[in-house]
Amino acid sequence: GQQVMQIPQYQHVQEGEDFTTYCNSSTTLSNIQWYKQRPGGHPVFLIQLVKSGEVKKQKRLTFQFGEAKKNSSLHITATQTTDVGTYFCAGRAGANNLFFGTGTRLTVIP
Amino acid sequence: DTGVSQNPRHKITKRGQNVTFRCDPISEHNRLYWYRQTLGQGPEFLTYFQNEAQLEKSRLLSDRFSAERPKGSFSTLEIQRTEQGDSAMYLCAIAVGETQYFGPGTRLLVL
């Protein structure tokens, strides 16, 4: 079955440092989405990538979809304490449902 | 505000009891999903409705689990004869295009 893995599982950074989480799928994806879940909260949609090699930016966040459409990354520049939370990628193969990754829990030390 | 409410927000029950959760989208949405999330893991797909039709069920959904969406609006998820392994957050989501908007979830603890 389809599997979506994320690394690292945890990341502690000093405020102002950069952060990157990587997502790898066992199968080729039609698209990939990223969600953020604050502690005690629910997943909140951030972005969707569809095209091979696509790069999208949202302020300090940069999202990338791999050429083979099997991997993706999220990079945060100059982290802030408001970035704290768990970041999930979620992949879809064809018309199938979303398969969420294992998540990367980000802690930002002030 | 995600446009999805879930009740109850928390539920503590004893093993063997039945529990029912409810998901209420604020406005009409064709597609509604149920997920289960355990600590330290991502949401796992349970089932999916297109209007009132249940179109897909995960293998995670044992015979003890049943979901309904009788009028194509709100949905219920029932777990019969709960087990300690059922302890998790149960999330409901509605889809707008390919984006899913999650409700706040119901946290279930089975003692």
Image (cartoon, rainbow, N blue to C red):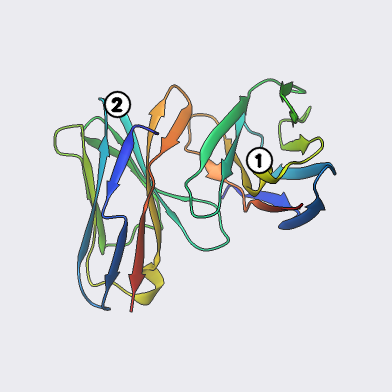
Q: Is A98 placed left or right of B27 in the picture?
A: right
Badge 1 is on which residue? Answer: A27
Q: Secondary structure at mark 1?
A: loop
Residue A30 seen in the current view: no
Disc 1 or disc 2, which is closer to the eye? 2
Q: Quadrant of residue A26?
A: top right
Residue placed furthest toward the left: B71
Residue A57 seen in the current view: yes
- The chain to which mark 1 is attached is A
- The chain to which mark 2 is attached is B
Q: Quadrant of residue A36?
A: top right
Location of residue B18 in the rendering, given as x and y in whole percent from the top left corner: 20, 68
Q: Amino acid under label 1?
A: Thr
> Within 10 Å of the Cα at label 2, are there few (<14), some (14-19), or many (20+) other Cα atoms?
some
In this view, the residue in front, B19 or A27, is B19
Mark 1 on the same chain as mark 2: no
In this view, the residue in front, A9 or A66, is A9
Q: Residue at 48%, 35% (x, y): give it.
A: A96
**Cα–Cα gap, marks 1 and 2:** 28 Å
Location of residue B87 in the rendering, given as x and y in whole percent from the top left corner: 39, 68
Q: Quadrant of residue B14?
A: bottom left
Badge 2 is on which residue? Answer: B30
In this view, the residue in front, A75 or B43, is A75
Q: Is residue A30 above or below residue A39?
A: above
Location of residue A103 in the rendering, given as x and y in whole percent from the top left corner: 64, 51
Q: Amino acid under label 2?
A: Asn
